[in-house]
Image (spheres, rainbow, N blue to C red):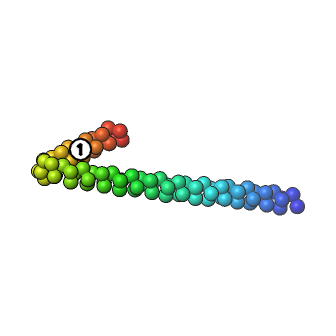
Amino acid sequence: MINKKGELHDINGAYQVVIKSIREKIALQMQETAVTAIIEKSINKQKKLYDSLRLQLEKRVGADVADIITGKISDGIENGSKKNHP
């Protein structure tokens, strides 16, 4: 009888570990989904602002100069990103 109780205790312990792991995985997946949604929203907003800037520059200084300026901005963003995330 003691042996069977011990086995049941071991099985229950393993079950609890599995349940805890599943809960943690689900929580991490939910967190990841939320973070991804925030990042996508931010990227879309930045793209709209960038496109608006490009159009304003094109109206004021022409397409060629707008291309140069927005290219420099893109390069600066890319270089800054590389410095912060090697």
Q: Taking the image as drawn, is residue 13 in sight?
A: yes
Location of the N terminus by quadrant is bottom right
Residue sitting at the far front = 60
Q: Label 1: which residue?
A: 73
Question: Along the horizontal axis of the image, is 39 left or right of 15?
Answer: left
Identify the residue shown where x is 28% and y is 43%. 77
> Mark 1: which secondary structure?
helix
Q: Nearer the viewer, residue 77 or 8?
A: 77
x, y percentage for residue 6?
Answer: 81, 57
Quarter holding residue 47? bottom left
- Please state, as top left, top right, bottom left or bottom right, where the C terminus lies in the image: top left
Q: Amino acid at mark 1?
A: Ile
Tell me the residue at 83%/61% (across/down).
4
**Residue 40 or 46: which is nearer the viewer?**
46
Q: Residue furthest top?
A: 83
- Residue 85 drawn at (x, y percent): 36, 41
Residue 67 visible at all: no
